Image (cartoon, grey):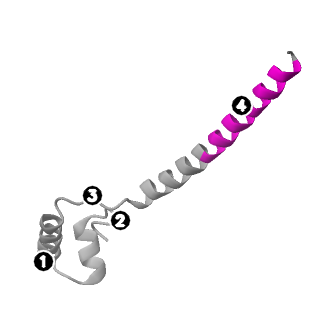
């Protein structure tokens, strides 16, 4: 929860009934072991990524449509 959801260590420690220092050490060890890896996306980052993918798909459809329309009108005026 601390790493994946970017939640405060103290808050998570209280919720799972673990000493804050213990949880902090676990988080530190995890981060050291996974230092070369890309950190997991937060919930807001996942939401933003999903929205951006949707926007990219829509823009690709518009671009394709406009390309076809331009080709059609180019043939009409020849």
Q: How far apart, in angstroms, are the residues tagged by discs 4 and 1? A: 59 Å
The residue that mark 4 highlights is 67
* Badge nearest the viewer, 2 or 3: 3
Q: How far apart, in angstroms, are the residues tagged by discs 3 and 4? A: 38 Å
Determine which of the numbered discs, if any, sits on residue 38 in the image.
Answer: 3
User: Which residue is painted at 73% across and 31% down in the image?
Assistant: 66
Where in the figure is residue 63, as x and y percent of width and height? 67, 35
Q: How far apart, in angstroms, are the residues tagged by discs 2 and 4? A: 42 Å
* Badge nearest the viewer, 1 or 2: 2
Q: What segment is highlighted magenta in the picture?
A: 57-76
Task: Answer with left or right where residue 68 lies relative to residue 12.
Answer: right
* Secondary structure type for disc 3: loop
The residue that mark 1 highlights is 22
Q: Earlier in the sequence, mark 3 or mark 1?
A: 1
Quarter of the figure with residue 34: bottom left
Which part of the image, by quadrant, shows the C terminus?
top right
Q: Nearer the viewer, residue 16 or 44?
A: 44
Residue 73 belongs to magenta span: yes
Q: How far apart, in angstroms, are the residues tagged by discs 3 and 1? A: 24 Å
Where in the figure is residue 73, as x and y percent of width and height? 83, 23
Q: Is residue 37 above or below residue 69?
A: below
Q: Is residue 49 above or below residue 4?
A: above
Residue density around tag 4, few if under 14, some if 14–19, many if 20 or more, within 10 Å:
few
Q: Earlier in the sequence, mark 3 or mark 4?
A: 3
The residue that mark 2 highlights is 5
Q: Earlier in the sequence, mark 2 or mark 4?
A: 2
Task: Answer with left or right where residue 28 lies relative to residue 75.
Answer: left
Quarter of the figure with residue 40: bottom left
């Amino acid at each position: 929860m601390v790493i994946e959801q970017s939640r405060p260590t103290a808050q998570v420690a209280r919720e799972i009934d673990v000493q804050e220092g213990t949880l902090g050490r676990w988080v530190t060890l995890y981060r050291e072991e996974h230092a070369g890896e890309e950190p997991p996306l937060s919930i807001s980052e996942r939401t933003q990524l999903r929205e951006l993918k949707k926007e990219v798909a829509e823009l690709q459809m518009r671009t394709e449509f406009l390309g076809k329309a331009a080709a059609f009108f180019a043939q009409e005026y020849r």
